[in-house]
Image (spheres, rainbow, N blue to C red):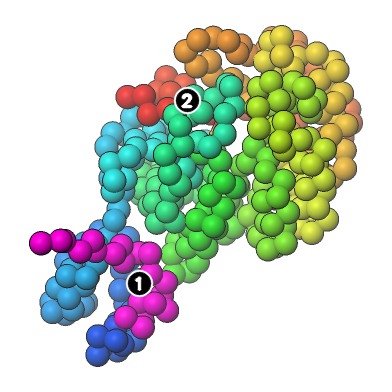
Amino acid sequence: METVKKKDIRALTKEQLRDFFVSEGDKAFRGNQVYEWLWQKSAHSFEAMTNISKETRQMMETNFVINHIKVDQMQRSSDGTIKNAVRLHDDLVVESVLIPTKTRTTACVSSQVGCSLDCKFCATSRLKRMRNLNPDEIYDQVVVIDNESRLYFDRPLSNIVFMGMGEPLMNYNNVLKAIEKITSPEGLGMSPKRITVSTSGVPKMIRKMADEEVKFKLAVSLHSAIDDIRTSIMPFNATFTLADLRESLQYWYNKTKSRITYEYVVWEGINDQQKDVDALVDFCKFAPSKVNLIEYNPIDDGEFRQASNNAIERYVQTLERNGIVVTVRRSRGKDIDAACGQLANKQ
Ligand code: SF4
């Protein structure tokens, strides 16, 4: 006999849930109650929904499943950073990271299993893209890290960055749905201002985000403002050129008036010359910008090496002289392969 695959109940909107209960002869309000269990209370079983009658719970059990993530392995770095290997309902694994500072806890979450892009310096690019994450799988990563933050640091999660595995703008609809849930009072109620979507730069999607007047922040992994160099380390730049990227960012700024952050690693022999700094200054001039110079974490073969302190200092001084805010970010969680560009399901 053919078994019918049950639908994941969390794929339903609140309206659809309300309609479902009405079609079952129940009250629409039941849909609200179940929705609250599924999102605000993160229930992983129908059994846990204690204010719902046993019959209704059984009826839901017959019709639906609640797919949820499971932390397979949690590793803690000597600097407090936590990396979770998260198993999805179909047994694929992604990683998410909790980064604590004195005053904040930031969740770095994944948006795809593997990645559709092919940045040469990134461990994730070696895993081919298997699939996009669903909104609930993104949401669940945040819930797990919020719980860990409360448990280990005695405070709720304060910030979220979409900088884990995958290119968030290549999974735009699901990322947006997850953010809607994260920011909704019926979800986690977090302010969108505390959320940053970090993209390697997909111009069409940046324009779309601007048109939709999203309220979260935008960061771009730039790494070079010279086309030839950027294409050699981020080959998709041949299609999404810097001119096109810049035009889309200009469009974003005009619409949102929201400062753009650039993520930037300086590598020895690749982008550590004065011409590289000058090109960066020229690229960011059109709008208020901030440049995060990120420490690089070598992945196995050592083709990419962090540039000298002198080269980084040259970036800092030139950017500051040109009125561009610059920070140098030390990497966290290196000892557990949890740092930027290191997420590759190595356990
Ligand atoms: S840096 Fe980001 S966009 Fe590039 S391959 Fe890695 S995960 Fe994908």
Say which quarter of the image contains residue 30: bottom left
Query: In the figure, is residue 66 to the left or right of 246?
Result: left
Q: Which residue is rendered at x = 39% and y = 77% of the image?
A: 16
At which x and y percent is residue 49? 22, 70
Can you say which quadrant of the picture contains the N terminus? bottom left
Query: In the figure, is residue 250 to the left or right of 18?
Result: right
Which circle marks residue 35 in the picture? Answer: 1
Q: Which residue is rendered at x = 80% and y = 13% of the image?
A: 273
Who is closer to the viewer here, 40 or 162? 162
One can see residue 55 in this view: yes
Q: Is residue 162 magenta?
A: no
At which x and y percent is residue 149? 40, 44
Q: How crowded is mark 2: few (under 14 residues within 10 Å), some or many (20 or more)?
A: some
Q: Which residue is rendered at x = 68% and y = 10% of the image?
A: 268
Question: Up-down: is 21 above or below 242?
Answer: below
At which x and y percent is residue 133? 43, 48
Q: In which quarter of the image is ligand 1?
A: top right
Nearest to the eye among marks 2 and 1: give it.
Answer: 2
One can see residue 104 in this view: no
Query: In the figure, is residue 158 to the left or right of 292?
Result: left
Which amino acid type is marked by label 2? Arg
Counting residues from the start of the chain, the first of labels 2 and 1 encountered is 1
Say which quarter of the image contains residue 214: bottom right
Q: Are marks 2 and 1 in contact (CB under 8 Å)?
A: no
User: Circle 2 — which element?
Assistant: helix
Whole-angstrom CA distance, mark 2 to mark 1, is 38 Å
Residue positioned most to the front? 1
Question: Up-down: is 135 above or below 58?
Answer: above
Which circle marks residue 126 in the picture? Answer: 2
Q: Is residue 2 magenta?
A: yes
The magenta segment: 1-20
Q: Which residue is rendered at x = 40% and y = 36% of the image?
A: 95
